[in-house]
Image: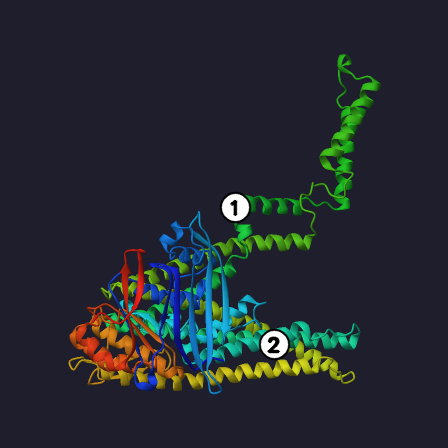
Amino acid sequence: MPYKHISIARLELTNFKKFYGAHPIDLLSRPDLGKPIVLIGGDNGRGKTSIHEAIYYALYEDDDLPNINTRPNYLRAVSDRLNHRALDEGKTDYGVAIDLLVKESAADRHIRIERKWKVNIPERKVVDLTLKIYENERPIDWIEDDPSAYREFLRSLLPPKIAPFFLFDGERIQQFADDDNREPRMIEAIEDILHINVYKLLRNDLKHYVIDHMEKSEVKKYQNDQFFELQGDKERLGNALDEKRERIADIDREIESLSRDQRQIEEELRRIASPHASERDELIAEESRLNRELDEAKNHTQKCFEPLPILLSGKNLRYSLRKQLEDEQRGLKSPDQREGLSNQIEKIKHRTFISPSPAPPKEVELTEGQIDFYVQRYDEATNEVFALNNDQTLILLHDVGEASRRQIMERLLAVEKQTVILKEAIDRCESLNNELREVRIKLQSTSDDPHVGELLQRKRAIDENVGGLKEEKKTITAEIQRLEADLAARCGQIEERQAWRKATSQAKQTIRLAQEARRVLDDFIKEIAPEKLTILKQHMEEMYLRLRKPEDPVRSLDVDQETWQIILKDEKGRPLEKRVFSQGMKEMYALSLLWALSRASGRELPIVIDTPVGRLDTTNRRSLFEKYLPFAGHQVIVLSTDTEVDKEWARRLAPYVANQYRLDYESSTNSIVIRTGYFF
């Protein structure tokens, strides 16, 4: 359960970056006295960003930190933040700690988080870390046996996905305006802040921890007899149907999400495709049509590949096979034919060797032994050549019957025709690809904005995903129809026998209830998301209209209920393009978005702003100091230079400031030190 009200009470840095030794700083504000601001001043390079990072590194590790994906990357990042003088002196104490004050209805909770890093001094790198968490000065030991539980506990305090909306760098704050709420990471964070992710997590947990778990561990197999075999078949078919239907539901959700992304991209293309917006709409429609026809042509080509192994054998080999089969067919002899052939051979033998006519001269006449020898050789040769001792006179290469031989020859003739069909299918695919390429080139040429190419590439990837999902859905739908027919047959057989008893009825009832709950959660998410976004819109509009300059063209805001796109409108209700805003307008927009998210979340969390006004002009600075910082939250920690919060603004902010500090360089220790009081 998320904590509703959290404040940073104290931060400690030990040999962290430019802070040599131990440096504590008390950060509690006094919202009860109207003093929510804690002001920390320092020249550039004096450790303001180090304090900002120390808060992050106290709360998170590994991929919960921005731009850190793996444990090795985390260890390298921490190694880069070790104080160089401490390493040179062989110090072993490195770490950060943060004390949080959590207000609850029952009683306040004081939570301390300590991270200490074990360092290989010769190699000057971190090799391990220890994490300890205390509550009201007592160690939280109920999760020590499970390190991942520590991480989940910290995520419940301030989820890392929403941290950038509360701990941010003013120099890069415009990125929230540039993102336009479209990046998946941004949407996930908004879902987290608005608690929509809680319902999605519950839906996924029902699948993982209830449905999948009970199907694997509690649904028992039936006994091995005819009755229970039928029950088992029905069980198997029912489970298979449920899985297929659940997959269909998942595919529908994925397609819905991808379709929303498609609409976002198409909307962006329409906005930036000037001056040929109407032509772009036609080209987008033509691209979709060509994609559909290309998918159909690919499917047709796939079917044409069935005789491909025979086609690849070559025309000569197919001709030889057909001729051999024809020869074998003609070479088959009947018994009468073989007898006639034998008689003819005997006549030749008699006229040549027994009673030659005419008689040979005396000098070449053979002896009786020679005649016997040549007669024997003649018999062997004729038997071998004419295969008189076999059932057929032709040597067969293919041991197939007459019917099979005819089928093979008919198949060979059909394959010859299939060559033309396959070539036409391949030519059709190539023609469609060429048309699609020309359409995409025209799409890119309708705008000189380089962002168009990136959007088209994303759109193509989404189109491919949607196409694959639709094909998968078509396949699964056919499988469902087959399974339903099989299930109906099993049910008819079971009705003819005794009423069957279900050994796992309770587990199955639980599974059905869990599946129904998942469907209800899907409907609930669709209902609650627009309400949450409406609240977000109201808060954002309230702050933006408070911060905007008089000449700012924005007069109202709206939120697209499907794409979550925040739309800024002019006095005539026309959408405005945020990408052409000035840096100051983007920062006012981003601050309004962050403030709205904070209010819509229903949680009171500390806000830390590093370098808040570096790119703002005088008018925007006045709006920030007078209308935003005093009202941004119950604890607003501002890290600033003396040119951002100068003497005059320090005086004006003084009524709202609970604590103020200055970061100075101390040459004797070559370290940054924290002193009470601001610059002036």
Residue for badge 1: 314
Nearest the viewer among 145 and 490 is: 145
Residue for badge 2: 211
Check disc 1 and report its element: helix, strand or loop: loop
344, above or below 131, in the image: above
410, above or below 661, in the image: above
Badge 1: residue crowd in 10 Å (few <14, some 14–19, many ≥20): few
Say left or right for 265 vs 585.
Answer: right
> Would you identify the image quadrant in which residue 611 lies?
bottom left
Q: CA separation, marks 2 and 1?
A: 55 Å
Image x and y of residue 496, in percent: 77, 83
Q: Look at the image and tell me whether residue 59 can be seen.
A: yes
C-beta proximity under 8 Å, tags 2 and 1: no
In the image, what residue occupies the spot 52% across and 85% down? Answer: 520
In the image, what residue occupies the spot 19% across and 68% down? Answer: 643
Image x and y of residue 624, in percent: 23, 78
In the image, what residue occupies the spot 55% across and 54% down? Answer: 413
Q: Look at the image and tell me whether residue 581 can be seen.
A: no
Amino acid type, label 2: Ile
Check disc 2 and report its element: helix, strand or loop: helix
The residue at the far right in this view is 368
